[in-house]
Amino acid sequence: MKVSQVNITPIAITDPPLLNAAGLHAPYALRTIIEIVTDDNIYGLGEVPGSVGTSKALEEAREVLIGQDPFQLNAIAAALQARFGEEGASARGTAPWDQRRIVHVYSAIEVACFDIMGKVTGRPVCDLLGGRARDRVDFSAYLFYKYEGAGGALGFGTDPKATGWAAARQKAALDPESVVAEAKAMCDEFGFKSIKLKGGVMPPDEEADAMLALQKAFGPGTPLRLDPNAIWSVETSIRVGKRLEGVLEYYEDPTRGQENMGTVGRAVKIPLATNMCTTSFGDIPGAIQHHSEDIILSDHHFWGGLRASVELARICRTFGRGLSMHSNSHVGISLAAMAHLAAATPNLTYACDTHYPWQSEEVLVGGRIPFDDGAVVITNEPGLGIELDRAALAKLHQQYLDAGLSERNDEIEMQKVAPGWKFMAQRW
């Protein structure tokens, strides 16, 4: 079996005007879909955050992939390393999201290869990663401060015909009361049992007030998380953290850098989590030295794929770190890959993040993957258990062409609303 064809398709999916430390989401989120086809016409799917640069890198990777055996992941990795060198090992930069393009490229390729392997062997991907530790993967409600608007072609406008969560996702959420309303609508629709708020947007004490309002509304038994995206000083992180002791399940990246996180962790009686200060295997020694986090939020897109994430899980177990999963705006290919990885990771014991409720479009036959009482159920279907809806893919590719976006830039989007606004690595 050899790879005979590699199809790379950038898409744009509707995204509401969500706020974060870096600014404002554009009306569309960009993703890149890769389809690897073998000479016996079996195909596998992968998905990564999209940009012109990522698509270009995947196009270059096509030359390496043609003729490779999709089961031989070590050979593929070596060939990609020879092609791209050490670019994937470079620092992720100051943006809240990871921009290491070649790491993204390899993760997309590896997921697609695992999808092929599962189809060839008749086994789900989780079985190829060591077998399932669970049949249901719990996910968490992921709240955002946001402006009113549905995103996409409507932008800041709304669809008056929308009902249920589709209507709620259009509403503004700029204070504790509206954040609670957003949470109730999302949990009612999807059954989530834990809640995360993307912070770093409002003054810190206002965000603490929102967490206290969520605790009051949902009760002390509901796990709550707050993520300021590392935009607070150590002093602010400690002060606000003390307000939230006994409220938060974990405190995600309140401040920037491993040493600073370690300082906050020693001062505040809340477990610290990260997907910013420890994001590669090269970061592990510093994480242990500074005890910069108690929980690592893994992400197969950013750690180098599914096998690397399994390796990370073993390291977390060795050094007594908790483990959960970070998310970014995505369609069902990434959600399926996340779910299979989580199903095969025994020590992933926290509900995973997902942006999936904020998106409304899909590239899969049968439409969107359902949540059953807040969880994705792992079936026995081979591979990732999904199939590509080619008409839907073509429609979202055309939407990408029409949108005219080349990369994610939340600062530019925010400047359209607030001229002169600038991202700051430390704002409070």
Image (cartoon, rainbow, N blue to C red):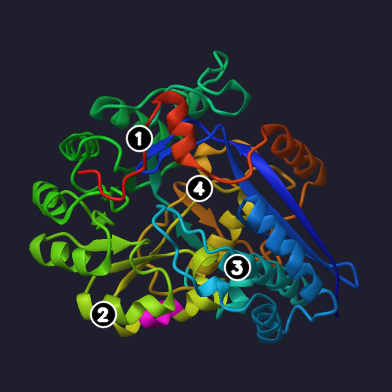
Query: Where 141 sits versus 249, above or below?
Result: above
Q: Which residue is mark 2?
A: 288
Q: Which residue is mark 4?
A: 372
- Local crowd at mark 3 within 10 Å, few (<14), some, or many (≥20)? many
Q: Residues within 10 Å of mark 2 (few under 14, many from 20)?
A: some
* Cα distance in 3D space between marks 3 and 4: 34 Å
Kind of residue at badge 2: Ile
Q: Are marks 4 and 1 in contact (CB under 8 Å)?
A: no
State the CA–CA distance, disc 4 to disc 1: 17 Å
- In the rendered view, tell whether residue 137 sits above or below residue 303: above
Q: Main secondary structure of the magenta part?
A: helix
* Residue 343 shown left or right of residue 364 in the figure: left
Tag 3 secondary structure: helix
**Front position in the image: 252 or 192:** 252
Marks 2 and 1: which is nearer the front? 2
Circles 2 and 3 in contact, beta carbons < 8 Å: no
Which stretch is magenta? 312-316
Q: Residues within 10 Å of mark 4 (few under 14, many from 20)?
A: some
> The disc labelled 1 sits on which kind of residue?
Ala
Residue carrying label 1: 183
Closer to the chain start, of discs 4 and 1, is 1
What type is the residue that disc 4 sits on?
Asp
Q: Earlier in the sequence, mark 3 or mark 1?
A: 3
Spatial CA span between label 4 and label 2: 37 Å
Tell which of 373 and 363 is nearer to you: 363
The residue pinned by badge 3 equals 102
Distance (Cα) linking label 3 and label 1: 35 Å
Residue at the (52%, 21%) spot, across then down: 163
